[in-house]
Amino acid sequence: MPWPSETQRDTEVFALIDKERERQSTGLQLIASENFTSPDVMEATGSVLTNKYAEGYPGKRYYGGNAVVDDIEAIAIDRVKKLFGADHANVQPHSGASANMAVYLGLIKPGDTVLGLSLDHGGHLTHGSPVNASGILYNFQSFRVGATDERLDFDQIRDLAIKHKPKMIVAGTTSYPRRLEPQPFRAIADEVGALMMFDIAHIAGLVAGGAHPNPVPYADVVTFTTHKTLRGPRGGCILTTAAHAAAIDKAVFPGSQGGPLEHAVAAKAVAFHEAMQPSFKNYAQQIVKNAAALAEALSKQGFRLVSGGTDTHMMVVDLQPFDAELTGKESQLVLDEAGITLNKNNIPNDPRSPFVTSGVRIGTPSVTTQGMKEPEMALIAEYIATTLRNRANPAAVAEVRAKIASLCAKFPVYTKRA
Ligand SMILES: *Cc1c(COP(=O)(O)O)cnc(C)c1O
């Protein structure tokens, strides 16, 4: 086939990809759900496997030519089962949201009651938001964090479970900075006869690296994304007990997806291999140490940490004590100018709307992948505070931006062109 020559190449898109590579490597990436994948993960993602149709599962495909793909998917399944100690794995979900929808489709019926954490208290859209299919199709009831300690309140969760008799309890969070103990969820699920789903999208890498309790021995089903702390390609995964394996596989394909993205499945296999290495344990521990150091440094700068701090890879920062006028929205914008990328985030019981917010969410997975440690976390806190204090002064913001570029240059993400 005559491939497009250099002159016909889509220079427009490739120039933009170069620009994005530049942005990622010259600024601080502090979005808690992001990470930098390895060059090997990217190589698998960009491989010939994107050309193959493989509807079905290893050994049971609808089309021919899948001998190699079967081996790849079988390796991915085998590795992830070992990594988390699971009976069964489905590595085909295109994303975390697809994984969650497949679980609902496979294990409950439209209209069934489900209990999950409220979105504005740290839950995810797919845990029953009224604008998401989960909230449209199922009767989600929400629990909230405690008014004073801003932590999960298992008495409240139990009361709600007894009152609403859910078919399923969904544990898991997207902006909650504390450990999630699986046992109390299991005890409540058993008491009311509910299934327990644990969505570890954010913390899968911490669980794999031993820096957060593993819910697999307690949950009926565990879902996660492979691209957050786990540091793999963009995608989802479902782990289940043997009892639910067939229902889950059927719900993914043919229930809610067509052909799997086998290039992504191969990249997941590569990421699982990387997460099985001893160095990944150090990585997971360092993410948590860095988050603790950054949280402490930010509180010294006058910010309030929701729940008083963090034991994970992320923190939610209440901006109000630092500056009552300052919103999450404005912070996100001016910090972006300074080369600091993070996201606005509601704090529990936020007086401002989700589009404005009184807080920001900050995570350390990406900067930890770059090799930054506690001393750099103190610098980052200082840069954040300086930028926000001088937000009306473009010269001061530009000065921070230059300092951040030189900090990032000391911790290159990709040494060669990736
Ligand atoms: C990120 C996330 C998801 C969704 O993942 P996508 O790949 O963005 O669809 C689901 N649940 C939780 C808890 C998450 O944090």
Image (cartoon, rainbow, N blue to C red):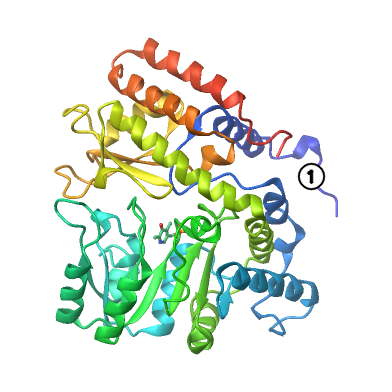
Instruction: From the viewer's side, name the closer residue of 397 and 186.
Output: 186
* Residue 47 in which image quadrant: bottom right
Residue 96 location in percent, x, y? Answer: 47, 63
Q: Is residue 48 above or below residue 13?
A: below
* Residue 393 in which image quadrant: top left
Please indicate, yes or no, whether residue 346 appears anywhere in the rendered image. no
Residue 171 location in percent, x, y? Answer: 34, 68
Q: Locate the C terminus and report the quarter of the image it occupies.
A: top right
Secondary structure found at label 1: loop
Q: Is residue 247 left or right of residue 164?
A: right
Q: Locate the N terminus and report the quarter of the image it occupies.
A: bottom right
Residue type pointed to by label 1:
Pro
Residue with the mark numbered 1 = 4
Looking at the rendering, the quadrant in which ligand 1 lies is bottom left
Q: Is residue 191 above or below residue 334?
A: below
Q: Residue at x 73, y 70 (%)?
A: 72
Q: Residue at x 56, y 73 (%)?
A: 85
* Residue 397 in which image quadrant: top left
Mark 1 residue CB less than 8 A from any atom of ligand 1:
no
Q: Residue at x 59, y 36 (%)?
A: 371
Q: Residue at x 48, y 86 (%)?
A: 244
Please indicate, yes or no, whether residue 271 appears anywhere in the rendered image. yes
Total marks shown come to: 1
Residue 266 location in percent, x, y? Answer: 69, 63
Residue 115 location in percent, x, y? Answer: 26, 73
- CA neighbours of label 1 inside 10 A, class few (<14), some (14 to 19), many (20+): few
